Amino acid sequence: MDIMDQSTIKPSAQQPRPALSQAEIRTIIIGIMLALLLAALDQTIIATALPTMGRELGDLEHLPWVVTVYLLTATAVTPLYGKFSDSHGRRITMLIGIVVFILGSIACALAPTMLMLILARGVQGLGGGGLMALSQTIVADLVPPKERAKYQVYFASVFMTSSLLGPVLGGFFAEHLHWSVIFWINLPLGLIALFISYHGLKKLPRFDRPHRLDLLGALLLVAATVSLLLALSWGGLRYPWGSPPILSLFAGSALLWVLFAARMKSASEPLIPPGVLHNPVVRMGTLSACFGMGTYIGLTIYLPVYFEAVRGLSASESGLALIPLMAGTVVGATASGRTMARVKHYKRLPTIGLIVAMAATGVLAAFGDRLPIAAIEAVLAIISIGLGTLLPVSTVAIQNAVAPHELGTATGTANFFRSLGGALIVAIFGAIVLSGAHLEGAASFERLAASAARSGVNLADVFAYVFIAAVIGFGLAFVFLFAMEERPLRGSAIKAAEAAVAD
């Protein structure tokens, strides 16, 4: 990390404030738990409803955009939320995120077409992008890295609830009520979260530092990513891979990424601060989480398609079948978080976990079409438990490596790349499925199967390539985690600030 002048750090970042009582900390935790539940439930509940959305709206080709546009807008604003919260406080930033998320959810529920649904999901992502990052940052404000593990149980309960209920509710609503209910449910939850966060976050300690929001950098990022996603979505479907439109999109994306990199170097307050990325722990931990979580998101989106199009399950049955993949990450994350506070070499458990996840995903690639559903469920549980061990280690290691006034920016940067990885990998998985089935134009799942049969393609073989791509994704997460420096966890946030400044 670049050397920083002590005088540039505000007194609030250098002098400890009076410690909050356990009751005050619990009040704050409850507020952010409800906000976190909004974001977590939205990710799990939509997965099993996606096939029904595509069927009812008659558009399977653009179905991946329901997920990728959310991840894209969430990705673009996550660093902005981090910087804004560093400047103006976590409370007001969290309230803004909740309000925008609620408005986006209402727009999603009312969407009459796939295009309107995609646009509304983009608005929802503008709010949801800050909820996850701010929740993690607020915990970092409250307790030092070495003590955070004992609070894992609170967040584990949120993710366990959303992991167990989300897929089942999504499938049930889509099959027996209407898919729009999965968005309407965010309205009462969001209002409760807004009320409690408004009052509960008043006593949150602040480490304010003024920042400029790099809107131009955000626009360049969105344009570069959209160009790349369009190339991945249209290549082999709407246009041949070597056609001028696809090549132009790839070239345009490359140019925009170069301009974004130049903007990072020239802007006084770039969207992604080079100083944060120069920190080797932040860089490697972020890349590991990017590929690990991105691959996981891709699996949560396309496994319901696999269950319904290949294995013949209904939407409700698909929701039940997805539970092991959702719930296992909570088990792995909880075990890893608790272990992290007690051992010196906290990287060992997630390193082993990623190896196990790679091996289990390889089993799906090799034998998925021959395994009974029960065996697939067991394999999915193993994959998710292995991947789950990475999540708390990467987050806490990144936060442990920066000063308190950089927590929002560093956490936002990590979540930025996690969301970006998810958007890209979802697009790649979609390209594999739709191109492999030789499907052209908007279609239903019936047309997906019919197109594959007409071309002499076995959909199970197509999904084998999806699982192979997932193995590669987990493998990259393993490589970057292995390369991440294992710094000792600080005993207090103040010591962490002093150590980060001295680096």
Image (spheres, helix red, strand yellow):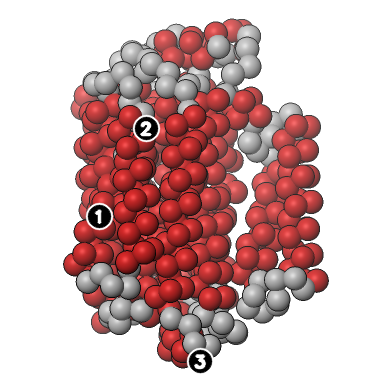
Return the residue at label 2. 393
Question: Neighbour class for label 3 at 10 Å: few (<14), some, many (≥20)?
Answer: few
Return the residue at label 3. 454
Residue type, mark 3 in image: Arg
34 shown above or below 425: above
Q: Earlier in the sequence, mark 1 or mark 3?
A: 1
Percent position of residue 5, x then y: 63, 9
Task: Give the image quarter of residue 380.
Answer: bottom left
Q: What residue is at 24 percent from the left and 38 percent from the top? A: 334
Q: What residue is at 49 percent from the left and 87 percent from the top? A: 456
Q: Nearer the viewer, mark 2 or mark 3?
A: 3
| Dots 2, 3 in contact, CB < 8 A | no
Q: Tell me the quarter of the image containing the N terminus.
A: top right
How far apart, in angstroms, are the residues tagged by discs 1 and 3? 34 Å
Return the residue at label 1. 381
Q: Is residue 153 visible?
A: yes
Q: Nearer the viewer, mark 2 or mark 1?
A: 1
Q: What residue is at 32 percent from the left and 66 percent from the top? A: 367
Q: Is residue 495 left or right of residue 22?
A: right
Task: Give the image quarter of residue 210.
Answer: top right
Q: Is residue 302 left or right of residue 336?
A: right
Element carrying mark 1:
helix
Percent position of residue 348, x then y: 33, 29
Element carrying mark 3:
helix
